[in-house]
Amino acid sequence: MSNRTFTMIKPDATSKGYTGAILDQIIKAGYSVKAMKWTKLTIEQAGLFYDIHRERPFFGDLVKFMSSGPIVAAILEKENAVEDFRTLIGATNPANAAEGTIRKNFAASIGENAVHGSDSDENAQIEGDFFFSKLERF
Ligand code: GDP
């Protein structure tokens, strides 16, 4: 079991001014920040990050959305980080997300759903490496 996961606060949430409130909820849930940056993806970079979804019908909308504005990328640490973070953010579609989850609190739709959370230890490692060098994580 890894103690680290990777997250992004997505462009819908940063543009609505939810960044601070989302980080507050994450930290209150027991996560500590090991790396963090405010950045903006190009459409090509968003496509690489979500390469696994390239054949899905929503891929075009997804990469356009993910490159439409700034994001916050972060590596987070806590015991059982990946699984607990998926519980904290809630279902992909905020309409199905449990009460009190980040997506229930802050997301508007299945596409524009406020936050990303890695779905496995392996992907947490790959996704963290996508954004951060060794010098940028502590
Ligand atoms: P996640 O692991 O909960 O983020 O969900 P997935 O891995 O299934 O999908 C990745 C991301 O693609 C989601 O977080 C959404 O931003 C987006 N997405 C998933 N399904 C749809 C969809 O049906 N329509 C649109 N527009 N975007 C979607």
Image (cartoon, rainbow, N blue to C red):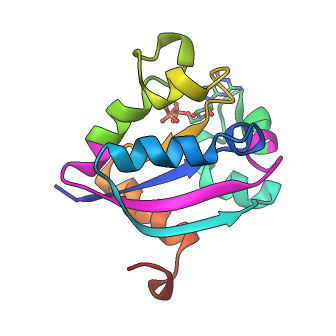
Residue 59: quadrant of the picture: top right
Image quadrant of ligand 1 equals top right
Q: Nearer the viewer, residue 126 or 68?
A: 68
Q: Is residue 53 above or below residue 70?
A: above
Where residue 119 appears, as percent x and y from the top left, is 38, 43
The residue sitting at 41% across, 15% down in the picture is 99
* Residue 131 in the image, given as x and y percentages of width and height: 57, 69
Residue 56 painted magenta: no
In percent of width and height, residue 75 lies at 43, 63
User: In x, y percent, where is residue 53?
Assistant: 60, 39
Q: Is residue 52 visible?
A: no
Residue at figure coordinates x 81%, y 50% from the top left: 69
Give the quarter of the figure containing the N terminus: bottom left
Does 26 appear above or below 76? above
Residue found at x 61% / y 35%? 114
Q: Name the side, left or right, on which 55 lies relative to 115.
A: right
- Identified at 62% across, 47% down, the residue is 19
Question: Visible in this render: residue 135?
Answer: yes
Which quadrant, please, contains the C terminus? bottom left
Residue range (magenta): 64-83
- Please say if 67 is above or below 44: above
Q: Residue 62 or 78: which is nearer the viewer? A: 78
Q: Quadrant of residue 21?
A: top right
